Amino acid sequence: MTVNFDHYAQKANQFVKHLAQEVGHPDEAGRTSILLRAVLHTIRDRITISESFDFIAQLPVFVKALYADGWKYREKPLRLDKEDFLKQVEKHQAQYGESEFSWEKSTEELVKIVIRELRSFVSQGEFEDVTAQLPEDLKKMFQAA
């Protein structure tokens, strides 16, 4: 079986360009990919490893790669409420090189947009499994996406 990496790269570029438009910065695919990575890593930090495996199983290859990049096993997920979750996304953005860009939208709005777009890849049941691990305020934010 031959793997067509060009196909995966094309799909990744299409998704990131679409996401860049959704967040209001169509010419900022690089910054948008940092935002996507930051949200994915914060989700990954907040759910159990077994749920992470179930979640990424439904994601496209290019999103799986972002999700798994730099992943370190954690016995227990971080306990993040909504406020902590949003701060963690911002921390990851800065860590990945994006700390001085004006998004013109709040971090919460940006996270909701990313979650909404990620939902197109996963089943409703899997989304419910992920949100079941979240505290009520964070669960509501995910469900509102």
Image (cartoon, rainbow, N blue to C red):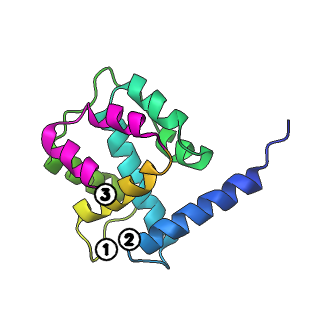
Q: Is residue 27 visible?
A: yes
Mark 2 lies on a secondary structure that is: loop
Mark 1 lies on a secondary structure that is: loop
Q: Which one is in front, 132 or 82?
A: 132
- The label nearer to you, 1 versus 2, is 2
- Are circles 1 and 2 on residues that touch, CB within 8 Å? yes
Please state the horizontal and vertical placement of residue 80, each as a whole percent of the image.
19, 39
Q: Is residue 96 visible?
A: no
Q: Is residue 144 magenta?
A: yes
Identify residue for label 2.
Answer: 23
Q: Between disc 2 and disc 3, whose residue precedes?
A: 2
Between the residue at mark 1 and the residue at mark 2, the CA separation in whole angstroms equals 8 Å
Identify residue for label 3.
Answer: 111
Q: Between disc 1 and disc 2, whose residue precedes?
A: 2
Q: Residue at x 42, y 77 (%)?
A: 25
Q: Amino acid at mark 1?
A: Trp
- Are circles 1 and 3 on residues that touch, CB within 8 Å? no
Magenta residues, as a range? 122-145
Q: Amino acid at mark 3?
A: Val
Q: Between disc 1 and disc 3, whose residue precedes?
A: 1
Identify residue for label 1.
Answer: 103
Between the residue at mark 1 and the residue at mark 3, the CA separation in whole angstroms equals 12 Å
Q: Residue at x 24, y 33 (%)?
A: 78
